[in-house]
Image: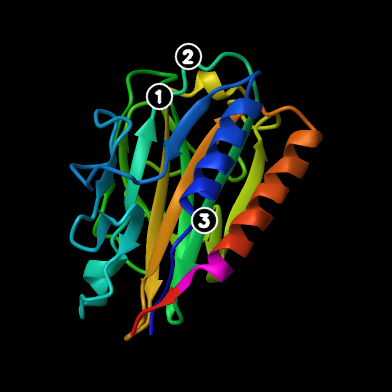
Amino acid sequence: MMHKHTVNTAVGIGIMFLISSLSGFGASLIQSDFSSGTISGGVNHTSLNQWGGNSTGWSITGGQLVNDTSLTNNNQREGSVGITVDPTGVGTGSKLYLGFDYDIAAGDTLYVHLRGFNATGGAITFSQNTGATNGNLWMGQAGGSGYNMRDGTLMPTSSEQFASSRLVQLTGTGSYLTSIDLSSYPISEVSDYEYITLAFANNSTVGGGGFIIDNVSLTTTLPEPSSMLLFGFGALIARIARKKQSVHQD
């Protein structure tokens, strides 16, 4: 049984406003409350600032990014979805802050992947293979260099990039918030990446109940340490609001 938690709209907008306002020394790369839009096209170097990928297994529905529970074929549900942004104009800074709300039913695991691409050595092209299963992210690449933003390691140019290269894997319900320090990476400035791609993938058992994602935010260089305290405070409010407004669906 899928327990769909309707995130309080005012709280969600408040958290996103808080994140945006705190990023006075940086910039917002992704702010998605899924109030509009569709899963359209691919995830690559030409499709910027839009969610694309596996439109069979994913949809933007009811103000949320939803993994379709009606599909009986797990392979169709497990293909990845993602968004590519161009960070070259964000100014100096070596930190990224990623946050989102999630509600994952029993039997499913959410895999989150974050990639950065730099055109050193020539123009770079890449495309996400949305047919990957079991939490994997397959990304074919030509030219330049692709990096795992989890730790700065250079990624292979072939499509076989496995679930083990994830930023994080999640189950249950909550608000995920993390900071990523690029200062020790081969490419240490956010603006020196030509592209950054955020992707979500599913690893589902038979009968898994799917999941929803909301209020996705990727920003740069928030003030410290007070900003992180407010980040955590906002996440706590969101959790309380979801518990109070939970709607159970059979």
Looking at the rendered structure, the secondary structure element under dot 1 is loop
Looking at the image, is mark 3 or mark 2 earlier in the sequence?
2
Residue 101 circle label: 3
Q: Which of 6 and 164 lies nearest the eye of the viewer?
A: 6
Q: Is residue 149 visible?
A: no
Residue 67: mark = none
* Distance (Cα) linking label 1 and label 3: 23 Å
Q: Residue 89's mark? A: 2
x 56%, y 46%: residue: 99
Question: What secondary structure do most residues of the magenta stretch adopt?
Answer: helix
Q: Which residue is more in the foreground, 167 or 145?
A: 167
The amino acid marked with disc number 1 is Asp
Q: Amino acid at mark 2?
A: Gly
Residue at the disc numbered 1: 86
Query: Residue 60 location, x and y as percent?
Result: 28, 53
Q: Disc 3 on helix, strand or loop?
A: strand
Q: Earlier in the sequence, mark 1 or mark 3?
A: 1
Question: For the magenta stretch, what is the residue range?
Answer: 242-246
Against 83, is 4 above or below? below
| Percent x, y of residue 122 | 36, 18
Q: Is residue 9 above or below residue 134?
A: above
